[in-house]
Image (tube, rainbow, N blue to C red):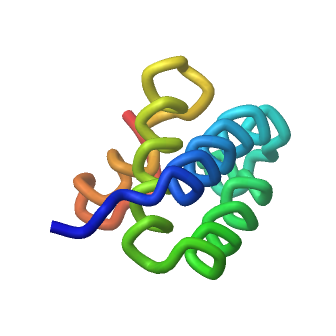
């Protein structure tokens, strides 16, 4: 088993926190909220930490945003709703 890098873990935590705080700055587009800071941080995490850590940062930030109510679940509902872009 590989040794877990404390520096990578600390940077991943800071990037995750930046995603959550940056999600306050979002704008509505076609019924969903677009958060450009989230996307920028996800790209930076993938470049600086690698693809596995980048996916982990994105997943953790998304879960925290959903649990705190900063993000709505409309994106998931759109996928399940057979391609229709209207919520009933």
Q: Residue furthest front?
A: 3
Q: Residue 13, located in which quarter of the rendered image?
A: top right
Residue 22 drawn above or below residue 9: above
- Residue 16 picture location, percent across and down: 60, 44
- Residue 66 picture location, percent across and down: 46, 30
Most foreground residue, 84 or 12: 12
Q: Residue furthest top?
A: 68
User: What count of labels does the image hold?
Assistant: 0
Locate residue 66 relative to residue 80 in the image: left or right. Answer: right
- Residue 88 picture location, percent across and down: 37, 34
Which residue is rendered at x = 37% and y = 54% of the image?
A: 78
Q: Quadrant of the N terminus?
A: bottom left
Residue 75 drawn above or below residue 46: above
Q: Residue 18, located in which quarter of the rendered image?
A: top right
Locate residue 2 relative to residue 46 in the image: left or right. Answer: left
Which residue is rendered at x = 41% and y = 36% of the image?
A: 63
Residue 67 drawn above or below residue 46: above
Most foreground residue, 18 or 84: 18
Which residue is rendered at x = 65% and y = 56% of the image?
A: 30
Which residue is rendered at x = 54% and y = 59% of the image?
A: 8
Locate residue 49 relative to residue 24 in the image: left or right. Answer: left
Residue 70 drawn above or below residue 73: above
Q: Residue 14, located in which quarter of the rendered image?
A: top right
């Amino acid at each position: 088993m590989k040794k877990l890098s404390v520096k990578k873990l600390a940077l991943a935590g800071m990037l995750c926190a930046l995603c959550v705080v940056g999600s306050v700055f979002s704008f509505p587009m076609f019924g969903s909220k677009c958060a450009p800071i989230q996307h920028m941080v996800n790209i930076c995490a993938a470049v600086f930490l690698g693809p596995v850590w980048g996916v982990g940062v994105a997943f953790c930030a998304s879960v925290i945003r959903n649990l705190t109510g900063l993000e709505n679940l409309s994106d998931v509902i759109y996928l399940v709703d057979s391609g229709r872009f209207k919520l009933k």
